[in-house]
Image (cartoon, rainbow, N blue to C red):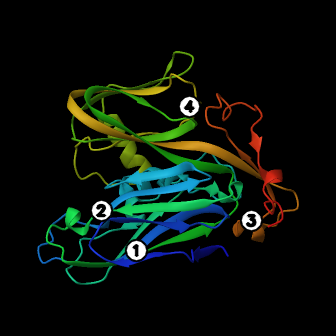
């Protein structure tokens, strides 16, 4: 199947906080859709109270390793961060797509006691066949955390997968930074190809720098509006404000090294959450692969899984862990 809804779903009828798991199939994935239908009873719903605020965390965990994470009120920004990585599954293009941010999601203000439909589209190409077990772990807050007078709630949460053989396996690494004026934020254990910085309070970021292993700066922005401009450009967003509410660091390739950091200077203390798009592996189709099988994500391929902390592996041709021969059925699907 090229596009399908995963059989495993989450459903319930309660206003209490909770958590559950959706088991994901081991396929090569081009993107996934997180969707829901929910019904909340609250006569006092106000602007900004939505599904994204009810959700506490969404994580994809593969063999115990988190390859995707977005927490409360982060789903839409992470979807926008990934919007440019929707390249065709049969090519390895360094070009970026420009999908308008408004086309990625719908999470409207609910009407009390009426069914509400929600969807978020995440361009997260990843060969899930590299792992033995893959699951999406979803936790949510009590309904009154988001809707203060909620008296009843029902919900069904599902995942749809657009399958397809891909050239790169990407992940989303989340790193929060506490309240401060100067932030030295780690960048995780993989090569980073893009990043999103979201301050707790708009307007406070004054400078952003990322120093490469050679001592030269890969990113040097002392005008934060430049990051906002790149955010609008890469996500196809029509600006509606001049606020520095989110800064994107554009398509790049910064390999791992132990001292790698994003340095952020702020005019006033604020928290910052960093989301990094990380390069976690690649995939090369075998000569006998057919285009039809590739579109369904089942074509014979050799998948390479990058190990955490592999310095420069994403930039050079250093050996990586090939998992194709270790996972039964990976090449025969």
Q: Which mark is residue 294?
A: 3
Residue 268 found in image quarter: top left
Q: Earlier in the sequence, mark 2 or mark 3?
A: 2
Answer left or right for 149 relative to 191: left
**Which residue is labeled 4 in the image?**
254
Q: CA distance from mark 1 to mark 4?
A: 36 Å
* Comes first in the chain, label 4 or label 3: 4
Crowding near the residue tagged with mark 1, few <14, some 14–19, many ≥20 C-alpha atoms within 10 Å: many
Task: Tell me how far mark 4 sits from mark 3, CA to CA.
Answer: 29 Å
Splitting the image into 4 quarters, where does residue 52 fall? bottom left
Q: Is residue 39 left or right of residue 163?
A: left
The secondary element bearing badge 3 is classed as: helix
Q: Mark 1 — residue? A: 36
Q: Is residue 40 visible?
A: no
Where does the image place residue 199, in percent across and percent down from the top left? 28, 40
- Mark number displayed over residue 141: 2
């Amino acid at each position: 199947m090229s596009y399908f809804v995963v059989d495993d779903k989450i459903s319930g009828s309660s206003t209490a906080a909770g958590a559950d798991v959706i088991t994901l199939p081991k396929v090569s994935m081009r993107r996934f859709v997180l969707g829901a239908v929910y019904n909340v009873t609250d006569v006092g719903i106000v602007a900004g109270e939505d599904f994204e605020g009810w959700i506490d965390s969404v994580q994809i965990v593969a063999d115990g390793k988190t390859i995707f994470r977005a927490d409360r009120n982060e789903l839409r920004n992470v979807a926008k961060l990934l919007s440019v990585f929707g390249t065709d599954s049969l090519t390895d293009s360094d070009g970026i797509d420009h999908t308008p941010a408004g086309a990625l999601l719908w999470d409207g203000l609910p009407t009390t006691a009426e069914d509400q439909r929600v969807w978020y589209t995440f361009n997260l190409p990843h060969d899930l066949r590299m792992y033995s077990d893959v699951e999406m772990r979803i936790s949510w807050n009590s309904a009154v955390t988001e809707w203060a007078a909620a008296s009843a709630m029902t919900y069904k949460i599902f995942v749809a997968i657009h399958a397809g053989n891909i050239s790169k396996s990407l992940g989303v690494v989340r790193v929060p930074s506490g309240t401060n004026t100067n932030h030295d934020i780690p960048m995780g254990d993989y090569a980073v190809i893009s990043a999103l910085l979201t301050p707790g309070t708009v307007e406070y970021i004054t400078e952003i720098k990322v120093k490469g292993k050679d001592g030269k700066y890969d990113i040097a922005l002392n005008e934060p509006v430049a990051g906002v401009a790149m955010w609008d450009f890469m996500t196809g967003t029509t600006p509606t404000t001049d606020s520095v509410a989110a800064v994107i660091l554009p398509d790049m390739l910064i390999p791992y090294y132990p001292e790698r950091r994003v340095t952020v200077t702020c005019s006033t203390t604020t928290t910052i959450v960093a989301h990094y798009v990380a390069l976690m592996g690649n995939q090369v189709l075998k000569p006998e692969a057919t285009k039809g099988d590739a579109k369904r994500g089942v074509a014979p391929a050799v998948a390479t899984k990058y190990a955490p902390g592999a310095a420069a592996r994403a930039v050079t041709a250093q050996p990586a862990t090939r998992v194709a021969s270790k996972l039964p059925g990976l090449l025969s699907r």
